[in-house]
Image: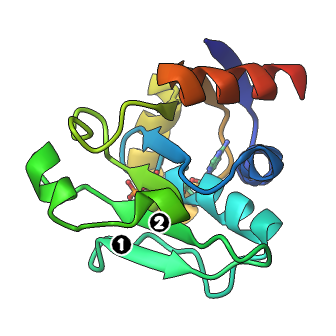
Amino acid sequence: MITLTVDDTEGMEALGARLAPLLRAGDLVLLNGELGAGKTTLTRGLGAALGARGAVTSPTFVLAREHPTASGVPLVHVDAYRLATARELDDLDLDYDHAIVVVEWGAGKLDGVSDSWLSIDIRRRAGDAARDDLAGDDLAGDDPRDVTITGTGPRGLELEASLQTAE
Ligand SMILES: Nc1ncnc2c1ncn2[C@@H]1O[C@H](COP(=O)(O)OP(=O)(O)OP(=O)(O)O)[C@@H](O)[C@H]1O
Ligand SMILES: [Mg+2]
């Protein structure tokens, strides 16, 4: 398990960029954390570093968006917020083997989909969230995030180890 603090938006994009050179086709990254935690922000940094075409945005209404990248291995960005079960995620019939797949809100929905993944949990600090509620969304500024990275399965553990070495 890797724990780190990411101070601001740029830092979250940089974490995504750090992940980019480690990932290959078949890899699965799970992003967990409440609304506005920074899941899409991390994915944007990852996409930029992969040379992904098309804007990386929250695909809330699309479920999954595929971005061609410089290496030829597409980045598939999934928002599983509206999916309730592993079955529904499985039903999307995503081509996991030939893509780098990033799933927002995928925790607990991967049974039967894969046995290896890298899980990244992003947590806002309680006080910061409360302050934003008072200020309104538009005024939300940069706040530190507590990030925990855990690998599951052989490839997940390998990715966790490479990320640790690359620190
Ligand atoms: N330390 C930080 N790390 C990441 N984002 C931050 C940080 N501080 C402030 N932000 C801001 O928080 C917001 C995070 O939004 P983002 O869309 O990435 O969240 P999300 O987790 O994808 O939410 P959703 O579940 O709605 O898709 C952005 O506006 C970003 O600029
Ligand atoms: Mg998002």
Residue name at image x 65 percent, y 39 percent: 143
Please give left or right for residue 100 compared with residue 88 in the image: right
Where is residue 66 shown, x and y percent of the image? 49, 78
Labels 2 and 1 touching (C-beta < 8 A):
yes
The spot of residue 10 in percent (x, y) is 79, 53
Residue 24 image offset from top left, x and y in percent: 68, 52
Q: Is residue 167 visible?
A: no
Which quadrant of the frame does ligand 2 lie within?
Answer: bottom left
Q: Image point 60% across, 20% down: which residue?
A: 157
The residue nearer to you, when weighing 44 against 75, is 75
Quarter placement of the N terminus:
top right
Q: Quadrant of residue 11?
A: top right
Farthest-out residue, top: 1
Separation of residues labelled 2 and 1 (CA atoms): 5 Å
Q: Secondary structure at mark 2?
A: strand
Mark 2 = which residue? 77
